[in-house]
């Protein structure tokens, strides 16, 4: 019953942009796309979220396709500290809706 | 703000013993979540509180698990009796119900039942 599909792992060279894809073809009109990451042994950390427009904050950019069936999280200049598991989640906002985590993408940033 | 505070950070206990995990959410956050993480099953939502009231406990694995939130600043997750298969990292997270900007997770409690 997965709502999102992500590649299990990706590599990225340090200093280069990391582009993490996510498919969410069954997303509903009132569901947002959320991204979290989990660095080894730590709790998940919120990164960014969006509905249909592209979003950018100090951590990352989120690009959502026009049909909203997929999105890409962009880390513009990946560092070794960005090595983590990245989770893409769809959920309704302002509803207290529970976040359901899938397997995520294990990003390895290499020197 | 000190963030979501969980205690203890590590707990080692013998099978059959009672285990109590504790969580202090961020002040002003009215939703609280308990998650469990294992290598095999990933991150699983156990129970969710809103304004101190349990809303959904469908993720609680069995009757040995119970959770309470006696006030807005404190929650416990109890396992009685504990079993080796309960060994996992337990995370607590909190959020403002009307805040769509995400949850804040604690650092977790690593539980080992021997």
Image: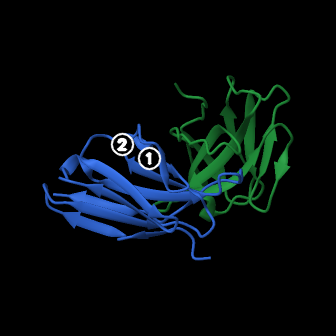
Chain colours: A green, B blue
Q: Residue at (74%, 40%) from the top-left corner?
A: A72
Residue A58, numbered label: none
First along the sequence among labels 1 and 2:
1
Q: How packed is label 1: few (under 14 Cα within 10 Å), some, or many (20 or more)? A: many
Q: Is residue B40 left or right of residue A67?
A: left
Q: Position of residue B19 (x, y in %)?
A: 24, 61
Q: Position of residue A94 (x, y in %)?
A: 70, 45
User: In terms of image quadrants, where is residue B68?
Assistant: bottom left
For the residues bearing labels 1 and 2, Cβ distance under 8 angstroms: yes
Q: Position of residue B59 (x, y in %)?
A: 40, 39
Which element is circle 2 on? loop
Q: Residue at (73%, 39%) from the top-left corner?
A: A32
Residue bearing mark 1:
B47
The disc numbered 2 marks a residue on which chain? B
Seen from the viewer's position, the closer of residues A61 and A94 is: A94
Q: Is residue B30 left or right of residue B47?
A: right
Q: How many marks?
A: 2
Seen from the viewer's position, the closer of residues A85 and B111 is: B111
Residue bearing mark 2:
B60
Residue A83: in sight, yes or no?
no
Real-space Cα separation, disc 1 to disc 2, in angstroms:
6 Å
Which element is circle 1 on? strand
Q: Position of residue B63 (x, y in %)?
A: 26, 42
Q: How packed is label 2: few (under 14 Cα within 10 Å), some, or many (20 or more)? A: some
The disc numbered 1 marks a residue on which chain? B
Seen from the viewer's position, the closer of residues B8 and B30 is: B30
Q: Is residue B80 left or right of residue A16?
A: left
């Amino acid at each position: 019953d997965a709502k999102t599909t992500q590649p299990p792992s990706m590599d990225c060279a340090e200093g280069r942009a990391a582009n993490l894809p996510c498919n969410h073809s069954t997303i509903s009109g009132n569901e947002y796309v959320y991204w979290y990451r989990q660095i080894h042994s730590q709790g998940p950390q919120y990164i960014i979220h969006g509905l249909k427009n592209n979003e950018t904050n100090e951590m990352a950019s989120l690009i959502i396709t026009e049909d909203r069936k997929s999105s890409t999280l962009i880390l513009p200049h990946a560092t070794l500290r960005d090595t983590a598991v990245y989770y893409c989640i769809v959920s309704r906002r302002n509803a207290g809706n529970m976040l359901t985590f899938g397997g995520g993408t294990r990003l390895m940033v290499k020197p | 703000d000190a963030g979501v505070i969980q205690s203890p950070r590590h707990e080692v206990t013998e099978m059959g013993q009672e285990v109590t995990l504790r969580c202090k959410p961020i002040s002003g956050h009215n939703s609280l979540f308990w998650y469990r993480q294992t290598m095999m099953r990933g991150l699983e939502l156990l129970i969710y509180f809103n304004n101190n009231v349990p809303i959904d406990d469908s993720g609680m694995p069995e009757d040995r698990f119970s959770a309470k939130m006696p006030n807005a600043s404190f929650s416990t997750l109890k396992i009685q009796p504990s079993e080796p298969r309960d060994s996992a990292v337990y995370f607590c997270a909190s959020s403002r119900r009307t805040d769509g900007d995400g949850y804040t997770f604690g650092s977790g409690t690593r539980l080992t039942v021997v």
